[in-house]
Image (spheres, coloured by chain):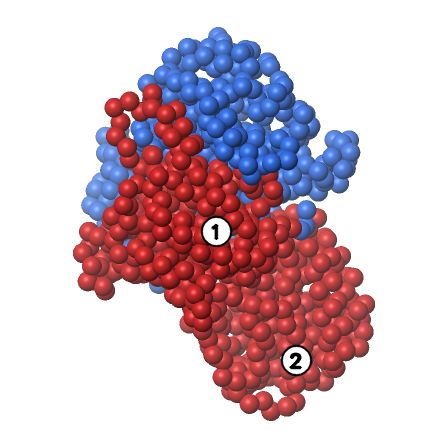
Chain colours: A red, B blue
Amino acid sequence: MRVLLAQINPTIGDLQGNIDLICKGIADGKEQGAELIVFPEMALVGYPPEDFLLLPQFILDAESALEKIIPLTLGVSVIIGTIRRHSAKGEKSICNSAAILSNGLLLGFQDKMLLPTYDVFDERRFFEPAHETRLWKLGANQVGVTICEDIWGYSDLSHHVSYSRNPVEDLAKLNPEFVVNLSASPFSISHFNSRLSVCAKAAQALKCPLLLCNQVGGNDSLIFDGRSLCVDKNGKLVACAKAFETDNLFVDLSVNHKPLLQKNDPIRDIYQALVLGIRDYFRKSGFTKACLGLSGGVDSALVAYLAVEALGKENVMGVLMPSRYSSADSLKDAQQLVNALQIDSQTISIEGPFQGFLDLMSPSFIDCLPDTTEENMQARLRGMILMSLSNKFGYIVLSTGNKSELAMGYATLYGDMCGGLAVISDLTKQQVYQLSNWINRDKEIIPWNTIKKAPSAELRPNQKDSDSLPDYSIVDNVLQLYIVEHQSPQHIAERFGYPLELVNELVKKIHRNEYKRRQGPLGLRVSDKAFSVGRRFPIVQKYI
Amino acid sequence: MRVLLAQINPTIGDLQGNIDLICKGIADGKEQGAELIVFPEMALVGYPPEDFLLLPQFILDAESALEKIIPLTLGVSVIIGTIRRHSAKGEKSICNSAAILSNGLLLGFQDKMLLPTYDVFDERRFFEPAHETRLWKLGANQVGVTICEDIWGYSDLSHHVSYSRNPVEDLAKLNPEFVVNLSASPFSISHFNSRLSVCAKAAQALKCPLLLCNQVGGNDSLIFDGRSLCVDKNGKLVACAKAFETDNLFVDLSVNHKPLLQKNDPIRDIYQALVLGIRDYFRKSGFTKACLGLSGGVDSALVAYLAVEALGKENVMGVLMPSRYSSADSLKDAQQLVNALQIDSQTISIEGPFQGFLDLMSPSFIDCLPDTTEENMQARLRGMILMSLSNKFGYIVLSTGNKSELAMGYATLYGDMCGGLAVISDLTKQQVYQLSNWINRDKEIIPWNTIKKAPSAELRPNQKDSDSLPDYSIVDNVLQLYIVEHQSPQHIAERFGYPLELVNELVKKIHRNEYKRRQGPLGLRVSDKAFSVGRRFPIVQKYI
């Protein structure tokens, strides 16, 4: 059987747009001799639609959308991820489902059995799980249909979850000729390897090939990496679609395929993920132009580069906003970046309004020493300038804080945290450097001076990040173990030989700054645990 | 049997503090002859602890905390809401549980069977449900133990949820002498009546008295109203603890109680809820002082009054920040409010920095007409002033936007949306007026002129809210039906006889401003569907 895995990029709630993508996929498949065409999980409605799933009209509209596609399946079989009402008794009234269409008929639905409810997933909020699975006769084949998590329950890679049902085992007993999996499996640095390993295990248990069709594209914080794939019955990867692009992957199951060697470059993955995340955020919300502040530091330089890659140099505006504390080097570095990227720029000094604001507040601040108040003022004036340009000309402001800074609260709320999209909020400071070095691998794009100088916010004379924070390598280790792996401070201190007081202080800082991050812009997720999505801690608490 | 419902106010993660409250409750109960003392759901760890539940150390610490309480139960029975690891096979490894202690022994645990996973509740993210229930022999009585939602599944009041298990029916078969329910049931305007009705139905089904012990206090956005209660076997309310205060409610089950008439004043409830919400936000996070901008309008006047009630007049600072567009009346009204509330105030004109900022941006804005950019500048300068006072003196800034404005995006991000707590973000404009009138029921506190004048942001000459928005009664009707009840625009238009285009335009505005609200401060929840918590919509979407 010849199968097309149609790796499309749906937009949440864009029913007509998604229908169009699906129609195009069906036409491509027919044209190139596919007998079965598979689309990703919830391809019809986009993923994740979140509380749109609670609007009865949304469900009706999704059902009507599916009706429109049925007649297009004459002469071919098609499996489409969607949602549907079910009529059985259950806690929730809708299912995350695969519609199975063949030759102009809707054969039925295979609902998702395992509903991830952890990290970024809230599927128990909306869906009733399937209670059974079966094989579907498509052409001459008996085919099993699963949706995303359905094959993950089989592995020990799920997040502290141990499902009582196992659709892979259920299907294995039915001896399918092959099994498809409709996915909306978001990217994280470690996730592709996990996904491959899950597919290999599932195929071995099923004793048949497994074909996974994954969504591609950015939807809010989540970035889907595509890389739809086929593993043979031994669990060997034999076909893989493009990463971070729409793609049509044709797989002929009657042919013996040679195992593929899939190379994985984590830094290149992050680069592609962020470019796609920016591009789709703008495209899907109807914006084209971005502006950002350029400080001469590495974070803003990296974001500017990524924005140019995503939006084109003609759509990125760099704003240099020096103050009395900006070094000559910083301005020079920022200007060098502007030249390298060939973007428009403006220079707007905050010196006048900063002095004006100091004067304004001086009657209220009698007998007060300067402190972070005056530092925050500068960051907020810069935020105001960027937001004024945004309001006047329709730029989306890109914020440039990294995960290490946001963890420590080393950022000004309503200042440098202003923006519509936080591009690198899920990159540690060390990853910022790794990615910047990678970008410069062939030639200097981000000025080497920007990369090599000691990080500074330049909000007071001779300020360095290291005045307020321990070395970023320490911060980043604590972040990984505390935020991502949920280890205790005790364990972290022992593991790295750090003083326990230091680790406790960093963990306290993380929680003390929850209130800032809660008001930050949406950030693009690339790690296994981002601040922006999938992490929910109370602001007021006394545990830490 | 004499029972104490110990209506305490736990803090999330404050294990020692919560132990102290529980010890005090046990001592009170013993002193006044209680044989059974019941505490609320998750009393030991605070509710909702959210992702703290994913930290293994947090679970261990909660288990140790329970150990400390066991010896204190000599001579009495005690039921405490907590969390525990379970050893059975299950998707999640911990349970939301009631620890049943008696005479210095831990008798066992009754886990929660129905796990709400809708609106503000995410319990399937963390917990494995109980698979069975039983009776517990406490003194001479056979007692059933339920946790919050366990009795709600029986009603038709749960949110589009129809559970397959029914702990009330299971318990009814066992003929309990009475049943207790440990709750952390958050306040909303309609919720107390629903809760009463649920308890009545459950008691009738159980054919025995039902005693519900509810948490009281504010935890982030959620406000718990207490009002622990007892209904007799006919479902009649016979005892009820105080609303919005800690309380000890003793119930002697051997006595025949007369039915209570419980009066419900929704506006007074909102008042008490918001005061408690402000007070606990400050107290539990260790802050004492608030500042806010006073525009002379009704929203800021109301928030100032509520802050004074919650924190004391000596802890509230009003800041008047006039501009060229402020009317003389507004300043006068704001000053009259300051006098009525006897709070400190400062007047800081934004005229200088506003002109400075206009001049600063003028080279970038050549050939541009004034628009909302210049309006937002003013709001952001005011935000900067408040944040500077906050940074310098440790005030928490209270933001003063109401739900109708936030729905419409009639607010400036990083401007009037600045703050640590959005006090009235879940009150419609009409509720703002109702509450203000109620506050003035005996004497003028909020200036009548403030209440009676047409609402205006005063960001351009002679501006009125009605220039940009339809009448607030229309906005508020659409909010109720679309946000709270999930009705379609078509249905809303028909129901009220509004033009469909108008309703569509308002619904579009709601979604178009999702990005602003995502960056707003935490708001206090009083409605059945708040923006700040329990509502999750994508920012980028094309459905609406």
Task: Residue lying at the far top in this picture: please name it.
Answer: B443
Q: Residue at x 74, y 71 (%)?
A: A26
Q: Is residue A266 visible?
A: no
Farthest residue, direction bottom:
A256
In the rendered image, residue B492, in percent from the top left (x then y), is placed at 72, 36
Mark 1 — on which chain does it sit?
A: A
Residue visible at 67% across and 25% down in the picture: B467
Amino acid type of the residue that numbered disc 2 sits on in the rendered structure: Phe
- Element type at mark 2: strand
> Looking at the rendering, which quadrant does residue A475 occupy?
bottom left
> Would you name the residue on which mark 1 appears?
A422
- In percent of width and height, residue A325 lies at 33, 42
Question: Is label 1 or label 2 in front?
Answer: 1
Is residue A69 shown above or below A210?
Answer: above
Question: Seen in the image, is B418 located left or right of residue B17?
Answer: right
Crowdedness of circle 2 by 10 Å Cα count: few (<14), some, many (20+)? Answer: many
Residue B381 drawn above or below residue A508: above
In the depicted structure, whether residue A217 falls above or below residue B41: below
Which sits in the foreground, B154 or B160?
A: B160
Q: Does residue A201 appear in this view?
A: yes
Identify residue for label 2.
A250
